[in-house]
Image: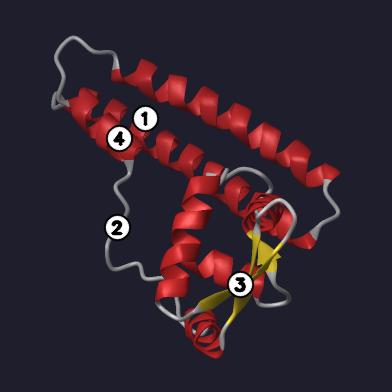
């Protein structure tokens, strides 16, 4: 996820201070992706350097108000108008872990899969409860994505377990 584009999107409706941006980001993403305030200010500095935002007046606490520039609006429109690329698959730690477990001697790979399934089911239940409790559309959409990802992971784990059983029946590993 691009913090750069997230901050530009949050600044689009109105100017904000760094702490406001962090709070708005966490609220919009259901607080599931905490954003470090240092990262906010580092990103704002780069955005200002690149002419995508401009700093304005400061308040009594010394916080600077940031607003989107015309170039920032253009950058944001380009980002919203493009698809998220799928050309570089993400480094999927779980897939790598299972693949390495399969090649390890003396390891119960089924136990590794079951442990992950249990953790994913717990997360899925938590996301589902949070979905029922929210009335915020943005928050709900983020939770929907997390639910769908967890469901897909559970299906993949089921698939892994079935392939493992088949390989064991066939005498391969």
**Residue 112 occupies quadrant:** top left
Few, some or many C-alpha atoms within 10 Å of disc 3 (few <14, some 14-19, many ≥20)?
many
Q: Is label 2 in contact with label 4 (beta carbons under 8 Å)?
A: no
Q: Position of residue 90 (x, y in %)?
A: 32, 53
Q: Position of residue 46 (x, y in %)?
A: 41, 67
27 is higher (above) or lower (below) than 14: above
4 is higher (above) or lower (below) than 28: below
Q: Is label 1 in contact with label 2 (beta carbons under 8 Å)?
A: no
Few, some or many C-alpha atoms within 10 Å of disc 1 (few <14, some 14-19, many ≥20)?
some
Few, some or many C-alpha atoms within 10 Å of disc 2 (few <14, some 14-19, many ≥20)?
few
Query: What residue is shown at x 66% (from left), y 44% (from top)?
Result: 31
- Mark 2 vs mark 4, CA separation in Å: 22 Å
- Mark 1 vs mark 2, CA separation in Å: 23 Å
Foreground of the two, 150 or 57: 57
Query: What residue is shown at x 65% (from left), y 68% (from top)?
Result: 10
**Earlier-in-chain disc, 3 versus 2:** 3
Q: Which residue is mark 1?
A: 161
- Mark 3 vs mark 4, CA separation in Å: 43 Å
Q: Position of residue 81 (x, y in %)?
A: 51, 85
Question: At numbered mark 3, what does the secondary structure look like: helix, strand or loop?
Answer: helix
Q: Which residue is mark 2?
A: 89
Query: What residue is shown at x 49% (from left), y 27% (from top)?
Result: 117
25 is higher (above) or lower (below) than 16: above
**Earlier-in-chain disc, 1 versus 3:** 3
Q: Which residue is mark 3?
A: 9
Question: At numbered mark 2, what does the secondary structure look like: helix, strand or loop?
Answer: loop
Question: At numbered mark 4, what does the secondary structure look like: helix, strand or loop?
Answer: helix
Q: Which mark is residue 163?
A: 4
């Amino acid at each position: 996820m691009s913090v750069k584009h997230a901050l530009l999107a949050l600044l689009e409706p109105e100017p904000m201070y760094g702490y406001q941006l962090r709070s708005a980001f966490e609220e919009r993403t259901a607080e599931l992706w905490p954003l470090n305030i240092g990262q906010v200010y580092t990103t704002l500095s780069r955005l200002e350097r690149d002419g995508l935002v401009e700093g304005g007046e400061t308040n009594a606490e010394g916080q600077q108000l940031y607003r989107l520039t015309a170039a920032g609006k253009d950058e944001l429109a380009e980002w919203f108008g493009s698809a998220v690329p799928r050309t570089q698959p993400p480094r999927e730690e779980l897939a790598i872990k299972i693949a390495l477990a399969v090649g390890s001697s003396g390891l119960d790979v089924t136990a590794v899969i079951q442990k992950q399934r249990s953790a994913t089911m717990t997360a899925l239940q938590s996301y589902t409860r949070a979905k029922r409790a929210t009335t915020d559309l943005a928050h709900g959409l983020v939770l929907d994505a997390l639910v769908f990802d967890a469901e897909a992971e559970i299906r993949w784990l089921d698939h892994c377990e079935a392939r493992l059983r088949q390989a064991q029946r066939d005498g391969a590993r």
